[in-house]
Amino acid sequence: MAQDEDIRIEPFTHAAGGWTSIKEVAHALGEAHIRLDGTRILLKQNKPDGFQCVSCSWAKPAEPHAAEFCEHGAKATAWELTTDRCTPEFFAQHTLTELEGWTDLALESTGRLTAPMRWDAATDKYVEVSWQEAFADIGQRLKALEPKEAVFYASGRASLETSYMYALMARLYGNNNLPDSSNMCHESTSTGLPQSIGVPVGTVQLEDFPLCDCIFIMGHNIGTNAPRMLHDLQQARERGVPIIVFNPLKEPGLVRFANPQSPVQMLTPADTRMNTQYHQLKAGGDLGALTGLCKALVAMDDAARESGDDAIIDHDFIAQHTHGFEAFCLHLRQVEWPAIEEASGLARAAIESAAEVIGRARRVIGIYGMGLTQHKTGVANVQMVANVLLLGGHIGVPGAGILPVRGHSNVQGQRTVGITEKPEMVPADKLKAQFGFDIPKDKGLTTVETCRGLAAGTVKAIVSLGGNLLRAVPDGPRVEDGWRKAKLSVQVATKLNRSHVVHAEAAYLLPCLGRIEIDRQGGIEQAVSMEDSTGCMHGSRGAAEPASDKLLSEPAIVAGIAKATLAANKVPWDEWVADYAKVRQAIEQTYPEIFHDFEQRMWQPGGFHRPLPACHREWKTPSGKANFICPPSLDEDDDMTARGPDVIRLTTLRSFDQFNTTVYGNHDRFRGIHGTRHVLMMNDEDITRLGFADGQIVRATTASTDGVPREVGGLRIVRYDIPRGCAAGYFPELNPLVPLWHHAVGSQVPAYKSIPIRLSRM
Ligand SMILES: Nc1nc2c(c(=O)[nH]1)N[C@H]1C(S)=C(S)[C@@H](COP(=O)(O)OP(=O)(O)OC[C@H]3O[C@@H](n4cnc5c(=O)[nH]c(N)nc54)[C@H](O)[C@@H]3O)O[C@H]1N2
Ligand SMILES: Nc1nc2c(c(=O)[nH]1)N[C@H]1C(S)=C(S)[C@@H](COP(=O)(O)OP(=O)(O)OC[C@H]3O[C@@H](n4cnc5c(=O)[nH]c(N)nc54)[C@H](O)[C@@H]3O)O[C@H]1N2
Ligand SMILES: [Mo]
């Protein structure tokens, strides 16, 4: 955790982007001790012949801006290219027990890892080990386990090539234990959308933005977490396209934006008002709001038809392409407005004003993020967004569609090429033909199930391709206890984090090249590829010299472990590492519809789009149609274990100064909170009602009835513009409050955005 500094709370009154943004980039570059010519590197970011940003997964346009990066992308680049080094000499000076007491920021600030390390029990220190020795020992230890006892986690940055190799390794080893960060992120999308529209990903591409005539955004903080999308939204606003936001917090990026690429906006105070309606619903109020929206659309359509006006609902589309409309309408007619208002925290008139705009639009794009997926009702939330769009026929036509904004820069692609615990998602026949083996049939473990397995002692080895599982997951302290008792932990990483300093009986820390670095195999520069949030695949070539000559690439590390672990198999691991084009050929053979002519098309400006049947109204669902799916309830908390006037609903968010568990600093510029991350943003009336004061330091305790104590102390109450009954604070500091069992029905995405808590004095 970053230490508190001078604490300042002051409202942010500027436009997002603009001058502050450029200044911030320079600041970040200066502070992170960037090597080489930072600007030269940055100009290659997100370019068709350059490297794909390691920060968010937003689309990379075919005709990029001169500087196609945002300040967060620049920060992420600077962070990877730091001149600081975390060397064997550093580890010689610190035991892991000591490092466990360090903050996240302090651990990562030690710089790039430089050499493969093995934990030494006698000294409680990491000591350098040769790559060959590391692989051989890891292989021995994995071979000694039952295949089901090992888990292969992936974080979402690794390339398509590495991900394909990693998944193949796990399946040859004998399991589908391939959880990844999407299990904590967009798995509600991957579970919900196939049932609704027959694809696990969004249907919107960049080309749709100039054609749409209405956009709604739910539960995504675009200004911080996918800032380059602000350009597309801004252009839409300048065409007069209405943008309707549903978010408990007024996020500045969704309020006003000054484009740092626009000379006019840079030289004058001009900026664009980014929304036309902003609805501050309750955290977890989305099912209520979306149900209200659909109910209002149906009512508007009834009225229009009675008076002979144009229909609001696309009845032809519904008749030809959908299933379940009548049952859905019946459900909507039965739900009463007071219940909708109570569940959403929004007035009927507010919801109707949104419906008025969405109902009259011809081409609507629905965008959403973690504010929808990380709830007990996460899957139902996603399906309700699909329902809204299906009512108006907004799926499968240009200028419209559904847009889940993914997290990590290749998290979507990682799933596409086989990193999934669900064996049915993998073309087993193709893999059999290519490599002569049957993939394991049993479903593997999700991230939540992996944590349960660690806590229960049934998961005995944890291999991680990036990430910081111990910080990212719910119930961290209990998972940590299990992790310490496991037999093996192997962490492939660029920078030091908590999941490296908490060790199993045997622990390895294997440093890899980052994507921005030049990857040479046998002296020949290699390229890799990834998939963005809009289903487009792009090539990526590193531009900077590696941080250390002892680093291996991720494909080389995966191949090293695979060769030491697996029985004889038909995978040409060494040939693949020598030439990544050969991995791409294998990917092409396994997934020919998506990856044909991979080698040529990956360099196409704008990338190449994967075919998605829903985009041309072909529905790969069991009914053969797009399905209206009724939500199970209106309120998240129908089965919540604890209720009462003193229970408030906590949502956990990212600040301006972080990338997931990587905390760059203590400033949340857009929310005006400086110098501390230990805060609870609360409504003024709640603060008074519960007998507290603005600025008071309190303890939060989870209001669950499972008998497990969960608390985080030292939290400063910050009076904030947030609906009554809700509070907001930062991930990962607040993760100990989230019970492992508190997750979305169907997808197991932890309900990080809806945690019942009580407050007490400290
Ligand atoms: N700079 C930067 N970029 C990132 C990341 C990062 O940490 N830093 N992380 C990456 C990853 S892995 C991901 S998944 C994405 C995450 O990007 P987001 O999806 O934006 O994730 P969060 O920051 O968790 O914020 C969610 C938003 O939802 C709102 N919200 C909270 N609860 C609710 C609710 O109940 N209903 C609704 N409607 N809204 C709610 C919050 O106020 C916030 O604006 O960003 C990616 N990009
Ligand atoms: N309370 C709460 N918890 C959450 C969330 C929330 O909103 N609220 N969000 C969830 C979400 S959406 C996600 S995606 C997860 C994130 O969970 P993870 O993906 O597990 O975590 P990250 O913080 O992204 O991982 C950071 C680490 O990755 C390593 N790394 C960085 N670059 C590379 C690379 O190129 N290669 C390799 N091998 N390693 C690299 C570095 O060592 C760094 O310390 O957290 C989840 N947890
Ligand atoms: Mo994520």
Image: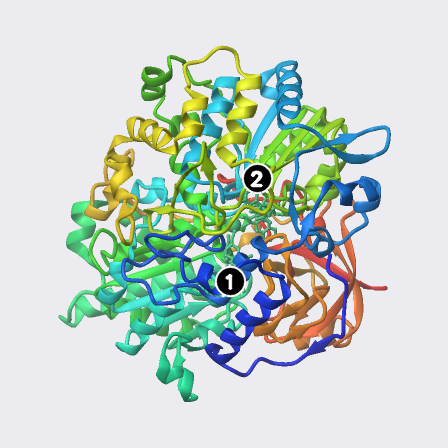
Q: Is residue 726 visible?
A: no
Q: In terms of secondary structure, where does tag 1 sit?
A: helix
Q: Nearer the viewer, residue 102 or 525?
A: 525
Residue 126, given in percent of the width and then of the height, sits at 76, 35
Pointer 1 residue: 38
Quadrant housing the C terminus: bottom right
Front-most of residues 364 and 182: 182
Look at 28% across and 37% down and name the residue there. 598
Q: Are there few (<14), some (14-19), or many (20+) residues within 10 Å of tag 1?
A: some
| Residue that lies at the very extreme toward the front in this rendered image | 523
Is 716 situated above or below 583? Answer: below
Q: Cβ of disc 2 within 8 Å of ligand 2?
A: yes
Marks 1 & 2, CB-CB < 8 Å contact: no
Which amino acid type is marked by label 2?
Cys
**Which label number is shown at residue 512?**
2
Q: Nearer the viewer, mark 1 or mark 2?
A: 1
Separation of marks 1 and 2 at Cα, in angstroms = 21 Å
Query: Percent from the top left, x then y, of residue 359?
Result: 27, 67
Asked where in the image residue 11 lies, by quadrant, the reply is bottom right
Amino acid carrying label 1: it is: Gly
Q: Is residue 730 left or right of residue 37?
A: right
Q: Earlier in the sequence, mark 1 or mark 2?
A: 1
Name the residue at 73% across, 60% down. Answer: 2
